[in-house]
Structures are given as C-alpha cells and as structure tokens.
Image: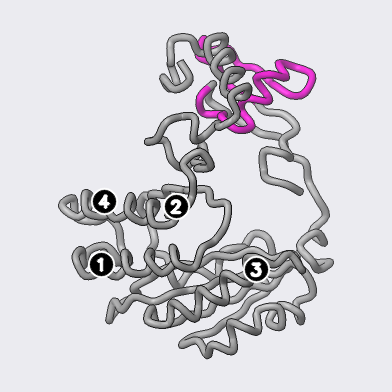
C-alpha cells in the first residue's frame, strides 16, 4: 500500500488567490505532486479522493489484525530494548508497533509499553512476539480490532480531550544505547516536572518550557551517532529546523520552491519555501 500520500487519486484545494481547483495526475499534476508531501504550504485542502483496498489486506477476511500491549517497569529497559531492537531489525513478517514511556496514575511510576501490530493470522500474532512474553511483563493484553478501532488498545495510555503536541523524528535505525539514554531522560522529566505525566491536559504554563527542553534532549539522544546529513524531519511533524531536513533532495526542494512562487507568492499560507 505504501504511505497515505502514495494512494491519493485527487484533491480539492483552495489556492491563495481564492480559486477552488481539483488536482490530479492530469489536472495541475505538479501541484498535485507537491501537496502529497507539502500540502499545507500551497493551499487549503478541502477534500481528498483515496485509492481503496480490500479489508483482507490487514491479514484476515474481515479486516482484523492482531495487536498487543506489553507493560514493563522502566528499570527493565535494557532487556526490553534488546528484544525490541532485534524485532525491528527483522523483515520476516508484516509487523509495526509503538514503544511508549508512560507514568500512569495513581503512583506515576515510569513504565515502558511495547504495543506491536501483526498483519497476518490472528493465532500467529502472539507467537511472533513471544520474546516479549518471555520477559514476563507486568501487564499483557491483546485485541483483534477492525479498522475503525485500530488504536483502541492504546486508550489506557491516553488522556481525553485537549490538544496533542507531536514532534516527529525520522531514524535510519534503532540503536539500543540511544533508547537507554532516552529512558533516563524520561525519568528525569517525571522527577523534575511532576505535571508532565498527568492524564488530563493542559499542562501548567510554567511546565511547558521544561517539557520542550526535554523534548529537544530526547530527539538529540535518539540521533546520537547519526551523521547530520542523514537527519530526516517529517514535514507534518517538525518545523523548527532547516527546511533541508524535511526535503533533503535538492531537486525536490528546488521544484517545491518554484511551485510556491507560482501558487502562493505572498506566503498566504506560510512563508516556508519562499
């Protein structure tokens, strides 16, 4: 299937001059190409037509797939990340997943949650992640959600309501030593900013600078040992660093800048690319 933008067939967009246009491979194909990876730089996208697939692509005829939650005390980080590193390095089967640091109420003790997804037989899911079970987690659960309930298994770790801030960083590989450094940073955050792990937003205003500081330290830790020229910032997640990190290919960036001058020369939507 690829990523979402690979499956766009057309889009309806309002340009800086107020014109409503429909773009696809035949109508304004260059603008259609641009909005696939930098849409908010060029206009207000009102509607997208996407390619669809049969539900069976998720591994079962009904469109279900296996998900699990493995919760460990943060002190076991070396063992957990040793297993996660080996799982991330293999391509034997179709898998995905999340690793999260949480400090759930009421004790607010830092913990690690590994939440894998397996796209295949529901019976094979637990077998594929048997190494995580062998670590004897504090809590384990599994589900087989349908597509609309894809993330329901993470409800226990999510506060309700409010604005969620995400800052994304692309990595070429998962390094266990960097993950362990990230573990220490999270523990320091919880100790120095008790407001940070609360389950109801918003944070106290006085806590935000400290959280943002730790956010930067966390990204630096995960990039340790990686050459700056290989850094990748995802376009829709991180916008504080040079734009070359979001669009590292020189020809792509040059084309985007030319299209920006054509469709939004005054920077109505953003001054980026001008």
Horizontal side of 8 relative to 188 (left or right) equals right
User: Which residue matches tag 3?
Assistant: 117
Horizontal and vertical percent for residue 155? Answer: 48, 69
User: Which residue matches tag 2?
Assistant: 223
Q: Which of the 4 image quarters holds residue 24?
A: top right
Q: Residue at x 27, y 54 (%)?
A: 211
The reply to whether the C-beta atoms of the residues labelled 2 and 4 are less than 8 Å apart is no
Horizontal side of 138 relative to 6 (left or right) equals left
Looking at marks 2 and 4 on the same chain, the residue that comes earlier in the sequence is marked by 4
Callout 3: helix, strand or loop? strand
Q: Which mark is residue 213?
A: 4
Q: Front-most of 4 and 273?
A: 273
Horizontal and vertical percent for residue 158? Answer: 42, 65
Callout 2: helix, strand or loop? loop
Q: Residue at x 59, y 65 (%)?
A: 97
Looking at marks 3 and 4 on the same chain, the residue that comes earlier in the sequence is marked by 3
Callout 1: helix, strand or loop? helix
Looking at marks 4 and 1 on the same chain, the residue that comes earlier in the sequence is marked by 1
The reply to whether the C-beta atoms of the residues labelled 3 and 4 are less than 8 Å apart is no
Between circles 3 and 4, the one closer to the viewer is 4
- Mark 4 and mark 1: span between their CA atoms? 12 Å
Horizontal side of 45 relative to 208 (left or right) equals right
Q: Which mark is residue 188?
A: 1
- Mark 3 and mark 2: span between their CA atoms? 25 Å
Looking at marks 3 and 1 on the same chain, the residue that comes earlier in the sequence is marked by 3
State the quadrant of the C terminus: top left
């Amino acid at each position: 299937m690829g990523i979402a933008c690979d499956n766009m067939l057309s889009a309806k967009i309002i340009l800086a001059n107020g014109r409503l246009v429909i773009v696809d491979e035949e109508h304004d194909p260059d603008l259609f190409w641009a909005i696939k990876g930098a849409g908010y730089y060029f206009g207000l996208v009102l509607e997208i037509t996407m390619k669809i697939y049969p539900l069976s692509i998720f591994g079962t005829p009904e469109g279900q797939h296996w998900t699990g939650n493995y919760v460990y005390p943060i002190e076991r980080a070396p063992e957990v990340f040793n297993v996660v590193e080996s799982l991330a390095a293999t391509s034997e089967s179709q898998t995905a997943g999340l690793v999260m640091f949480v400090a759930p109420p009421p004790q607010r003790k830092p913990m690690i949650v590994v939440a894998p997804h397996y796209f295949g037989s529901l019976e094979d899911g637990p077998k594929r992640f048997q190494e995580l079970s062998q670590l004897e987690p504090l809590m384990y659960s599994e589900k087989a959600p349908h597509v609309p309930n894809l993330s329901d298994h993470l409800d226990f770790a999510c506060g309700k309501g409010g604005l969620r801030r995400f800052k994304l960083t692309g990595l070429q590989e998962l390094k266990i030593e960097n993950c362990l450094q990230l573990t220490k940073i999270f523990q320091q955050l919880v100790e120095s900013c008790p407001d940070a792990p609360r389950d109801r937003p918003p944070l106290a205003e006085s806590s935000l600078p400290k959280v943002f500081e730790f956010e930067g330290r966390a990204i630096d830790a995960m990039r340790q040992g990686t050459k700056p020229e290989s850094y990748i910032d995802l376009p829709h997640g991180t916008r504080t660093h040079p734009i070359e990190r979001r669009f590292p290919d020189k020809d792509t960036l040059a084309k985007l800048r030319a299209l920006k001058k054509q469709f939004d020369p005054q920077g109505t939507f953003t001054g980026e690319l001008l």
